[in-house]
Amino acid sequence: MLPAPFEYHRPSSLEEAVQLLSSLDEAKVLAGGQSLIPLLKFRFAAPAHLVDVNRVPGLDGIKEEGSVLRIGALVRHNEITASDLVSARYPVLAAAAPQIADPIVRNLGTVGGSLAHADPAGDWGAVMLAVGASVVARSARGEREIPIADFLQDIFTTALSSDEILTEVRVPAPAPRTGGAYLKLERKVGDFATVAAAVHVSMDDGTIGRAGIGLTAVGNKNIEPAEAESALAGKEPNEELFAEAGRLAATASNPVTDVRGSAEYKRHVVEVFVRRGLARAIEMAREA
Amino acid sequence: MKISVKVNGTERTADVDPRLLLVHLVRETFGLTGTHEGCDTTSCGACTVLLDGTPVKSCTLFGVQADGREVTTVEGLMTGAELDPVQVAFKEEHGLQCGFCTSGMMLVGKALLERNPDPSDDDVRWAISGNICRCTGYMNIVKAIQLAARIKAGATEPAKV
């Protein structure tokens, strides 16, 4: 399949990239391309211009600075998998990365691109909601930081303006005793999630400090079940509490019936995954 | 757009439409038909090539993105008249039936052995999980990649080709 014709631009600096985005009509940013190129091939999208940012310096790297983990927009999923820093300190990121697509796609697909694509079945949106991340958007007008909950607006729709490029994802450094889990149900490797749940919990002494939850493929965007999160804060963890949080998360989800399962089934999986994810994350936090 | 790509060690140039996919650049522009186009939807892995040594699905990358970079296809596995250990092992272990997925499988196997010289069963299955064998000949593919590891390590004499 051949995409509709487009003009190809390959800026060699971020300044050049944002200038292109502000001056061109109907331009799309090409990063890993693992979602965008299939869309172009099916002609669900036919932008007049593609701005390939793969050779823009400064958009790579995973580094912790102060109390923030900075993930450059060109960091591939497999770089997250290979990062010792991530596996040591960011358990929900480490759990999610190897479950995305398949190993070959993970060599090209990027964290930033996945977020900017805003597919409700995308994994990173749920993970970033759970950890309370934000993204940095740059344009010729300047730079702004957008909390992930405001960034993800609707199916394939984000808070990015057409002249903005996502340059970085910022994840708050975890509290000392933190655990996380990403549970994903998929029909086969490489398929989109039927349902997935990200859980990120920090412990204060014997009680739960902050609990973050994000859900995948059960709504028109990744969902953060706020009532489930607040039901957990300050409580002593136990199975009953996890089950209650699971029920609240299932209520907050809004899945549709499709080839991957009925809405009822998916809602049930949310309940089970949140319950199990909490148990796993809290066990991890206690051992930390 | 004029591009220059090092394909299997040889510098090649072409003037291509930016929307030309890498798989078509390799197969049609450069005439290297060992790379197969299977599903055309990033699912099957038959079109896998190595870009600067890393496996990528060439149906989900534009040819212009390979400009200035190095592409290895199945034709690049041989050194002179000598088969790569992965090729020898696929032959020995009957790691192919119809052969359609084979070039992708072998390139993924080669990349795996570069970073993991002694992969377990699970390591191999994990590595090839983005490649579909429609003959379902996975058992022998896994065995072949592990035999290639032993050949590379000098633990097994490669059979005469």
Image: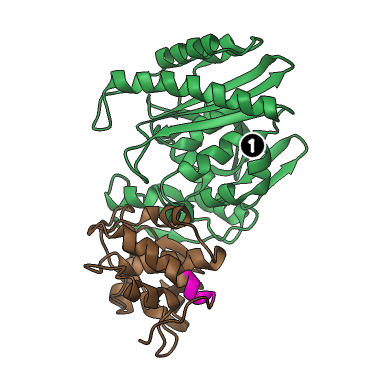
Chain colours: A green, B brown
Residue B73 visible at all = no
Tell me residue A66's x, y (percent).
78, 37
Q: Position of residue A137 (x, y in %)?
A: 59, 39
B91 relative position to A132: left or right: left
Subunit that carries the residue with mark 1 = A
In the image, residue A65 lies at what x, y percent? 75, 41
What amino acid is found at the position of numbered circle 1 in the picture?
A: Tyr
The front one of B148 and B103 is B148
Q: Is residue A232 at least partly visible in the picture? A: yes
Which residue has dot 1 on it?
A90
Magenta stretch encompasses residue A149 = no
Disc 1 crowd, CA 10 A, few/some/many (<14, 14-19, 20+): many
| Residue drawn at the location 64% of the way across and 10% of the way down | A236
Of A254 and B62, nearer the camera is: A254
Q: What is the quadrant of the C terminus of chain A in the image?
A: top right
Where the N terminus of chain A falls, by quadrant? bottom left
Residue at the far front: name it. Answer: B156
Please, what secondary structure does the residue beneath circle 1 have?
Answer: loop
Task: Give the total of numbered labels.
Answer: 1
Q: Which quadrant of the view contains residue A120? A: top left
Residue A32 vs B14, above or below: the answer is: above
Give, as a single range, the part of the protein colored magenta: B149-153
Q: Main secondary structure of the magenta part?
A: helix
Name which quarter of the figure residue A6 lies in.
Answer: bottom left
Q: Identify which residue is drawn at 66% across, 16% down.
A: A208
Of residues B134 and A165, the one nearer the viewer is B134
Judge left or right: residue A185 versus residue A142: left
